[in-house]
Image (cartoon, rainbow, N blue to C red):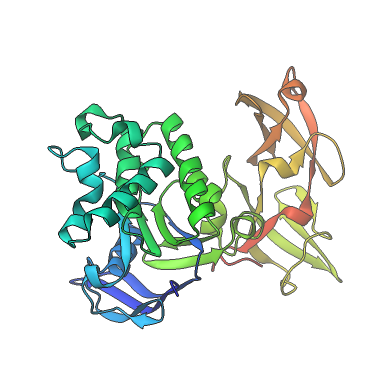
Amino acid sequence: MSAVQVRGLRKSYGPLDVLRNIDLEVREGEFTVLLGPSGCGKSTLLSAIAGLDPVNAGRIEIGGVDVTDLDPSARGIAMVFQSYALYPTMTVRNNMTFGLRVKRLPKAEIDKRLTWAADMLQLTALLDRKPAQLSGGQRQRVAIGRALVQQSRVFLFDEPLSNLDAKLRAEMRVEIKRLHRELAPTVVYVTHDQIEAMTLATRIAVMRGGQIEQYATPDELYERPQTLFVAGFVGSPAMNFLPVVLRRNGGAVAAELGPVTIPLDAYAFATPPADGTQAIFGIRPEHAALSGAGVQVATETLFMEPMGADTLGWFQLGTEKLSARLAPQTARGISGPQRLALDIANASIFARDTEQRL
């Protein structure tokens, strides 16, 4: 077994609580991403799982074994760091096999593992080079190869792609996804890049202030965010947020935005809200269109942002701005008053005080 379980984990630096009662279960073979802004505690959580950072309270299990107080070397993990951490005077071959030689594995076994990992990562032709002779993407592949040869069932990645340019990041995402599909290890991966998280993860734990706000599949996070923070952090372009007052008329609920009223008949409330509830109405740009089914609202065109395959159109709705994702051909020449169709079934509504989904 290679599942990872974290229960009631707490970590403090003096009076500062960095992790607050974290519960996390990573199933065997799952690719879990810890996603959040700088300072949210995601790297601290990864370090705690690795055994690099002692915790104040809680329990960590790997493969059903309590490893809370074990040294990193006894946890059966392999780790890939943001900084590559390669030995500059060693060749690729020696960097990848150093840990195996320290363990005094037989030379035949070391060569076998090296050949397998180098072939998988397309590093065979680079084995006699030193890190200074490699590109950033090649160095990161060496760092991953060094972890692969350990043949651990749990891999921990700490923002491994943040030092690469956009093109290399895209290429390495494909490589990491392929490796996970072929080897099926359990992975815990830290990043602040939501695109990286959405493309790689089986499930994503969105963190804020030392706590997990939501732990779900990428689709669920995107389509049904449970908090205002998750809704704003996941998705590019960002979700539109409009401050509204919810009004009830019998069984019907509508959102008031100044003089604008948005009927919410198509929205599935968990519990019918009280009349006068202060709320945030959220809708993603792709769920606002210039034509089609949905609630029609009158807007005024502000400006267009060409983004290549899409154009982000900005419109004035009452006292607020609203963006809509448009086809470039549709967006050209648009100006003046426009009626937008809002797909209310795909909207998200949050209580303004608790920031929880209604």
Residue 166 appears in the rendering: yes
Q: Quadrant of the N terminus?
A: bottom left
Task: Pinpoint residue 356: horizontal percent, then vertical percent.
Answer: 58, 67
Horizontally, is 289 left or right of 138 in the view?
A: right
Q: Residue most toward the top?
A: 333
Residue nearest the observer in this picture, 336 or 355:
355
Q: Nearer the viewer, residue 12 or 249?
A: 12
Image position of 214 with respect to 58: above or below: above
Furthest-left residue in this view: 89
Q: Residue furthest front?
A: 108
Quarter of image, res 53: bottom left
> What is the total number of numbered labels drawn onto the structure image?
0
Left/right of residue 116 with respect to residue 29 in the rendered view: left
Q: Residue at x 61, y 47 (%)?
A: 239
In the rendering, at what x and y percent does residue 78 appear?
A: 32, 60
Report if residue 233 is visible in the image.
Answer: no
Horizontal and vertical percent for residue 191?
A: 40, 51
Left or right, residue 109 beside residue 270: left
Instruction: Classify 111 as above or below 47.
Output: above
Among the 4 quarters of the image, the one containing residue 333: top right
User: Is residue 343 shown above or below 103?
Assistant: above
Task: Please indicate whether residue 318 sits to the left or right of residue 131 in the image.
Answer: right
Work out whether 56 lies above or below 332. below
Q: Residue at x 29, y 72 (%)?
A: 75
Say which of 165 and 213 sits in front.
165
- Give the camera-side residue of 90 and 264: 90
Q: Quadrant of residue 73?
A: bottom left
Q: x, y (%) of residue 160?
A: 35, 46
Quadrant where the image shows the C terminus: bottom right
